[in-house]
Amino acid sequence: MKAKRSKAVRYNKWGYIFLIPFVVTFVIFQLIPLINTIYYSFFEYFRSGLNVIGPNFKGIENYIKLFSNGDIWKYTGNTLIIWLMGFIPQIIVSLLLAAWFSDPSLRLKGQRFFKTVIYLPNLIMAAAFAMLFFMLFSNSGPVNSILVSSGIFEQPYPFLDRVWTTRSIIAFMNFLMWFGNTTILLMAGMMGIDTSLFEAAQVDGATSTQVFFKITLPLLKPILLYVMITSLIGGLQMFDVPQILTGGNSPANTSRTLIMYLNDNLYSKNYGMGGAISVYMFVITGILSLIVFKFTNGKKK
Amino acid sequence: MKKKVLSMFLAVAMLAGVLAGCGNEPGGSSGGVEPGNESSADAGTDASQGTDVSQGTDGSTESDTYKRADGEGTVLNIYCWNTEFMNRMKDHYPGYVAGKDNTTADEEGNVSGTVEATIDDITVKWNITPNKDNAYQNNLDEALLNQESAAADNKVDIFLVEADYALKYVNTDYSMAVKDLGITDADIADQYKYTQDVVTDSNGVLKGLSWQGCPGVMFYNREAAKEVFGSDDPAVVQEKVKDWETFNATAKELHDAGYQITSSAADTFRTYTNNVSSPWVIDGTINIDENVMNWVNDSKALVDAGYTGTHELWSDDWSKGFFPEGKVFAYFGPAWLVNFSMSADTEGSIGYNGGWGACEGPQGFFWGGTWICAATGTDNAGVIKDIMLKLTCDKDIMTGIVVKDDDFVNNKPAMEALADGSELINGAEYTSKVLGGQNPLPMYCAGVDGLDLSNLGPYDQACTEEFMSAMLDYMKGNIDLDTAIDTFYKEVITKHPELTAPEE
């Protein structure tokens, strides 16, 4: 008996030892920066040229400045609008593709090929991808050349000088980069569903639409929830594509996202205001994730 | 298995195709995409690449070479953002011996890394960080902030700055007064005044020197001038653009003939902002000068009438006027723009056929330039003084730079002698092929002589960038003027939290 117990304790010890690398990395690279960010958000702390100003404790002054200035709401709105514009088509197309790919009765040919192809845009560096679209949609770019020479437009249309075309291009790029990834995640979820359920439904005479909405979707919920929340977090952190596509100067700043705003504040190493924006984003992300969670789980009752 | 191999192959092939496409785009585009901080630097590097270098091309004798003084440090650290100054040193500084090159270039041609060289028994260490995304300044800031605690051999000795942010460094104790190095007013008397204005701090102390001047002129399309004005003579064209009022009237004339007077409203921005009567920031409050507002009003009128565009500088749309089909009448810029950045080596371009002409334009201005500053705490004051004297004050060496690198050097007598033909290059008067055989030097000299830059400030980089982008947004019709001005204030304050917007 005694020997057995000591053995169990030793196993526990190994468990903790194996956890050390993670805990150490987490504390150094995640927890301490997180606490620091929150801490400095209450300070005046930036550089004026080469002179470091602060840190001077200022209470919630940074937050008052942030919200009274009003821009933060605009940039939150921009971020959410562009994310939704990309995410809605993304989830619809991904669901459709995943359903087709995972349906054995369709016997689609060349599945492997298409799965690879739809994932490819995700492998390109966002920066290179944004540069490519910048060239494509510039006034003298190929898209305008085609539109003008085919007579659809008389003059080149300044895509990147107009609010909604700029937003649409960013949303489309995000869609293109991420729908393959989402498809593969959803497909994994669908393949995990017991095939006997589909067979039973077919035997009972269910149409494929009914099968999709009554069987596939409800059973896919855990994966769907995961996809939605990760995509939401990714969307709120949208930065590289709009930054490089617009060079930070979108029409009337309507394509400036929260992280781009944060980036501008770090120009003068403004850790105080930067911290305040980060804390704001932390809270917003938390609230939105909770809403998605409640919304998706609530239906079950 | 076969399928797997096939799909893998296709994936790789596709990816390679896509990536190759992307990689080629930026470099292959006409005019090239330049990062935010343009300077003559880019141009200068192009000029000296691929040329063999031999010591003593300027006729300097062995006795001219610098010998390390007793007690002077043995390592000279130089911070810079490209290889331009290094190439000038290599080609023109007596006693400079090039060493190991550890640099790499990215796909846009930005060089970064370190290079070693020697002057006498001093090791020269070049620390090159590209300008892109403010990386050079970020790196330099960290180095200077650690200057005091760094070991003598690791301290920054020389750093280079550009006009847009020179005062950020010059107004601090991190840069040394030129006088403290032992350089006298008499040594630098031949330099252009504006080059000293740029690096004079708020107490009137000169803290850096430059070997080059970048006076700008107006380059016009000769074919268009013949077509519209009946002559491509610089004097005739100058009469058409002699001040802003005439310039704007001429815009209509050109428009009726199918030409845009400039490619973008951004083209004339520097010319207006170099001729202001008040700085961007007065006592911590942001200020918009009258001449800057003139730019907004004049340009808005031109844009609304369709006489010019609203493209960002260096964009493909902006560059289309480098070719005759672009139907652009004029660009504003210094010598390096027309020589190296306007597709002059591409067949069919206006520059390739020598189709540009130069005239002074409505007002004088400058664009670009690199200044040499000595960092406080350096243990190499002797060699820094020698470098500054030889490269920025020595007429013979500087004439050598004009001959070899096509730079406009910061030496009035040297430039004036070349301008009026009393000094010949390889037995002939200086002419420019891109400008159809015209000698533009008299114009450069005249344009830069009267330039007064005492209104430069430490916030200019952020102010000009943000003002330009907010106003282009207004000119495109996305926002009204009040919103644009408001946006400008907000953006500048975001970048510099210590500033305030003026009370309404």
Image (tube, rainbow, N blue to C red):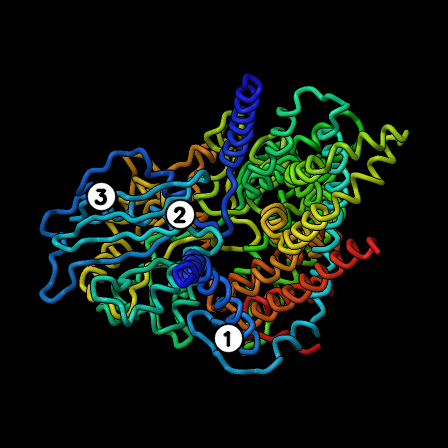
Quadrant holding the C terminus of chain B: bottom right
In the rendered image, which quarter contains the N terminus of chain B? top right
Q: Secondary structure at mark 3?
A: strand
Q: Position of residue B499 (x, y in %)?
A: 57, 74
Q: Marks 2 and 1, Cα distance to the nearest angstrom?
A: 34 Å
Callouts 3 and 2 close, C-beta under 8 Å: no
| Residue placed most toward the observer, B387 or B297 | B387
Residue designated by label 1: A45
Q: Are marks 2 and 1 in contact (CB under 8 Å)?
A: no
In the rendering, which numbered label is found on residue B41? 2
The crowd level at tag 1 (other Cα within 10 Å; few <14, some 14-19, many 20+) is many
Q: Are marks 3 and 1 on the same chain?
A: no
Select label 3 or label 1 by which is in front.
Answer: 1
Q: Amino acid at mark 2?
A: Ala
Identify which amino acid the numbered label 1 is placed on.
Answer: Tyr
Mark 3, chain letter?
B
Disc 3 and disc 2 on one polypeptide chain: yes
Query: Which of marks 2 and 3 precedes in the sequence?
Result: 2
Q: Disc 3 designates what residue?
A: B100
Q: Which mark is residue A230?
A: none
Left or right of residue B38, residue B59 in this image: left
